[in-house]
Amino acid sequence: MSDTILILDTATENCSAALYHNGQVFEDCAEAPREHSQRILPMVESLLSQAQISLDDAAVIAFGCGPGSFTGIRIGTAMVQGLALGAELPVLPLSNLAAMAQGAINAGATEVVAAIDARMGEVYFGHYRAEEGLAVLQGQEVVIKPDTLQPQLDAIGQATTAVGTGFETYPQLIANQHIEADTSCRLPSAAMMMPLAQHGWRTDAAISIDDVEPVYLRNEVTWKKLPGRE
């Protein structure tokens, strides 16, 4: 059985793709707000060309399903929908907060808090712990106001790595001496997601594209599937 995994992510300012094939990881990433719809497919095509394979050779398509930019999440989900349907492939939706936490864990962190600026005076937040090298969510991902989040961060009480644009926008959140920012993981990328995608594929977590629900964390937003697949 093939273990080739394609990952793409357009949920934040980063537009990125990564491909695992025959023990090699190919990747491309650009911080390019408002250019995701033009950039993501050429990125995917370039990686497939570098690996000298076609999309049909992949086992699964993983992608950043949010939280993040509403428009970016929709672009990525629609792209995955088209690719997965065309190649008849299952998909693996992956958290963008978990992706940043995984990036920090790949660099040696064990306790990670991730926050993405959600605008409107809020952040998307998740608390993760390294378990067997993977970012494992502690509690739930939430959209939350900084003043409400602050006591939760203060209560962690152990050395913690902070990642994401939420902590850039609200630096007071990590004024506590036990929390240290990792700016190398300020935005998620497809390559950061690779360990999570490989674990998901090995543990049969892949689903049909028809079952995908993007993660917005704001209830008023809904995803419209392609006509005839509602």
Image: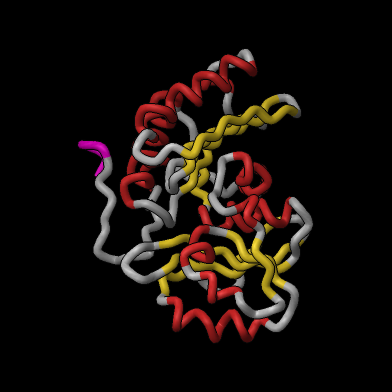
Location of the C terminus by quadrant is: top left
The residue depicted at 43 percent of the width and 61 percent of the height is: 117
Residue 212 shown left or right of residue 103 in the figure: left
The x, y position of residue 125, in whole percent, is 50, 68
- The span shown in magenta is 226-230
Q: Quadrant of residue 48?
A: top right
Q: Quadrant of residue 54?
A: top right
Location of the N terminus by quadrant is: top right
Q: Of all residues shown, which one is farthest toward the left? A: 227
The x, y position of residue 47, in whole percent, is 57, 22
The residue depicted at 66 percent of the width and 51 percent of the height is: 103
The residue depicted at 56 percent of the width and 43 percent of the height is: 189
Query: In this rendering, is residue 136 above or below 95?
Result: below
Is residue 65 in view? yes
In front: 45, or 12? 12
The residue depicted at 50 percent of the width and 58 percent of the height is: 165
